Amino acid sequence: MRTFLACLVCCFAAQLHAAKHVVLIVWDGMRPDFVTESNCPTLFKLSKQGATFTKHHAAYPSATEVNGTVLATGVNPARDLIVGNHEYRPYVDELSDVHTEALASVRKGDENNHGEYIGVPTLAETVRAAGRTAVVAGSKPVALLLDRKERTSTKEGVNLYAGATLPASLGATVSNQFGPYPDEDATNPSRIDWTVDALITDLWSNGVPAFSFVWMNQPDLAQHRFSPGSKEALASIRNSDDNLAKILAALDKKGVRDSTDVIVVSDHGCSTIAETADLPGDLAKAGFHAARKYKTKPNPGDIIVASNSGSTMVYVIGHDKKIVNDVVNFLRKWKHTGVIFSREAPGAFPLKSIHANSPEAPDILISLRWSQGTNKFGVPGIITTDGTTFKPGQGAHVTLCPYDMHNTLIAAGPDFRAGYKDQFPSGNLDVAPTVLRVLGVNPKQKLDGRILTEALKDSQPQKLGEPKTRTRRLIVQNWEQYLTYTQYGGVEYYDEGNGAQK
């Protein structure tokens, strides 16, 4: 009898972890409303073979580095410690903001934070710690955040990020085989073509690892330059789709397609710029000492503005409460303000309410204003940006506009229900817990996301009750702002937020 029960337990466990491999693919900036048979036939077909998450959410701020790290860790920005693409980290640069995915930021960040620039282990690190294999291949520098540890041997895992490699010694081998990394505007091959070719040929040469993390830089780049819905953006979606087909064909050729879960997700959505702002210029006109970059070390009370396109971060040197409060008061009258968050200033939502209160978070975070209007291609989502090189008519994101916050998630393979449309709220926060669940790997740390059990074939869906959508409102004098979010399974998913003078 014991033997029989033991066999049942083993069979059940095998069913729960049917996949021997997981391939997690990010289509940077892919909006769910562009997942159609004509735009991306391979992804559309995959959605019919697996599960489509119809109420999927980016983390806020809806920026690449923020969501890349959330996808890689399964914890909120306050815990993974990346709250923006651009942050003020004075141990890296005292004079201006820095790119959080840049190699110098990563290396100095680990040095400054005792090896914890990212506050918790990433998926690649967790899978390897469990004795399994993992590789990362990305056509954008954000891929460094997914797997950043220095190494001298490929036995410790491989990361191919924006043409560079870990270990560094692998770089010459890849370049000799596939040529130099393409320019940003190259189309034959594109950066995605080059990266995927290297993945399936070189990184998978000894077999498909237990976990592969693939980052495609499109359609984000084309949407930024030409806006969502443009012919260039649609062409970039097709290029990503062609490379998805290439990955699936490689899995077929290696005989592991039936034992591989393929998950396609985007880090965020994208909107169209209607107007651009200059926050430090307007602060200076109002009597504040504010700049994006200083020539000498800023003094206490000086303000550094770190633009993240559709959201902007304000750092008051020394965290003077009066100056912070004065800036918040200014922002409530600034015509571009959507939603104001702050460490503790009255008249703003607290940063902790969106889990963005990392130790190095800004004093103030502003999501800029948006509207439901459409661009010249009939695509909805119109936003204001600050301090970006992109102009009106081009694309951007990082606001609390629903078209920035609602993104794509499709999963197919032995663990996922076929033809399933998940009507429950989900988010990028849930991807890592679900990947680890289907691989049968237990993380050492508690994750903030939930396992998407309702979409798994052989898993008992958790009884999480009904989703509850709520709206926080804040009215101060003539200013009113709101934040709408959905609570489900102990997770908060941010739907939208905006503000206006009454």
Image: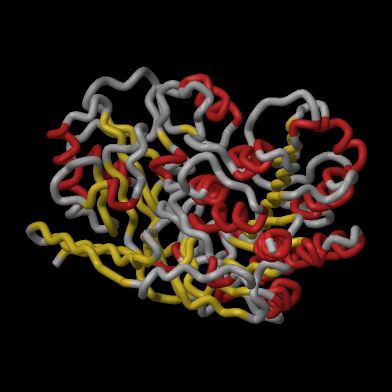
**In the image, what residue occupies the spot 75% across and 36% down?**
157
Residue 420 drawn above or below residue 200: below
Q: Quadrant of residue 51?
A: bottom right
Q: Pick the residue in front: 90 or 443.
A: 443
Q: Is residue 297 left or right of residue 239?
A: left
Q: Is residue 293 left or right of residue 441?
A: left
**In the image, what residue occupies the spot 47% across and 35% down?**
119
Residue 163 drawn above or below residue 501: above
Image quadrant holding the C terminus, namely: bottom left
Image quadrant holding the N terminus, namely: bottom right
Relative image position of residue 54 (x, y in whole percent): 52, 75
**In the image, what residue occupies the spot 59% across and 74% down?**
52
Q: Pick the residue in front: 250 or 474.
A: 250
Q: Pick the residue in front: 11 or 66.
A: 11
Residue 497 drawn above or below residue 48: above
- The answer to whether residue 295 is seen in the rendering is yes
**In the image, what residue occupies the spot 85% across and 51% down?**
200
- The answer to whether residue 18 is seen in the rendering is no
Residue 130 drawn above or below residue 117: below
Q: Is residue 60 left or right of residue 437?
A: left
Residue pushed farthest left?
477
Relative image position of residue 77 (x, y in whole percent): 42, 45
Q: Quadrant of residue 456?
A: bottom right
